[in-house]
Amino acid sequence: MEASKNTTTSPLGQAARIEPATLDDLPKLVELTMSLFAMEQDFVPDRQKQERGLRAILEEASRGRIFVLRTDYEIIGMVNTLFTISTAMGGFVILLEDVIIHPDFRGQGLGTRLLEHVIAFAKRKDFKRITLLTDKISDESQRFFAKLNFRHSNMIPMRLSLES
């Protein structure tokens, strides 16, 4: 297991630790992604789709990892990392998705800890780059990622939906 040795304490006095998610965590992960997509303009929350996508990652480690921030009683945050290959970078890279901390626990540095864990994981595993998409209308989100040294790219994301 790639559990973080660092723990942090929430106002409730519960130690929070970072560790890989398991299939047992799926219901809580679905709830977190549903709340995330409810805030974003590009997505419509769909419980079945979110469960199917999260399960696909959890069931096949070569696709990526989902890391959770967990207390003794609940999951209070998550991030998923998807693995792919960049010919430009000449190796494996990570697409970072679904970064979310439960609203009751925001503003305590937990999101920073979660992202620092992902960055350390990527360095240990020799990934060449981490790419993410953030909501362009959310200055708060952009400031958060910039604080962790993520920078804007000249690339512009474009999508082609293949669903009818």
Image (cartoon, rainbow, N blue to C red):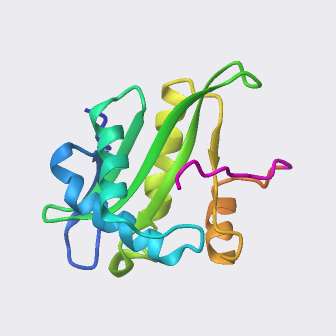
Picture coordinates of residue 55 (x, y %)? Answer: 29, 44
Q: Total marks drawn?
A: 0
Q: Residue at x 42, y 35 (%)?
A: 64
Please, which residue is most extreme toward the front here? Answer: 164
Seen in the picture, residue 124 relative to 149 is either above or below; the reply is above
Viewed as shown, does residue 62 lie left or right of 127? left
Q: Main secondary structure of the magenta part?
A: loop
> Residue 88: within the magenta?
no
Tell me if residue 6 can be seen. Answer: no
**Residue for point 46% across, 35% down:** 121
Q: Tell which of 130 and 111 is nearer to you.
A: 130
Tell me which segment is drawn in magenta.
154-164
Where residue 46 sits, quadrant-wise, is bottom left
Along the line of sight, the residue nearer the viewer: 134 or 140: 134
Q: Position of residue 122 (x, y in %)?
A: 52, 34
**Is 1 drawn above or below residue 90 in the view shown?**
below
Task: Kindly tell me whether residue 45 is visible in this rendering.
Answer: yes
Which residue: 64% across, 68% down? Answer: 135
Q: Position of residue 21 (x, y in %)?
A: 27, 46
Image side of residue 56 versus residue 121, left or right: left
- Outermost residue, top direction? 90
In-image side of 41 versus 104 (left or right): right
- Residue 51 point in image, percent of width and height: 30, 54
The residue shown at (28%, 40%) is 3
Residue furthest toward the right? 154
Q: Residue 31's image quarter? A: bottom left
Whether residue 140 is situated above or below residue 134 in the rendered picture: below
The quadrant in which the N terminus is found is: top left
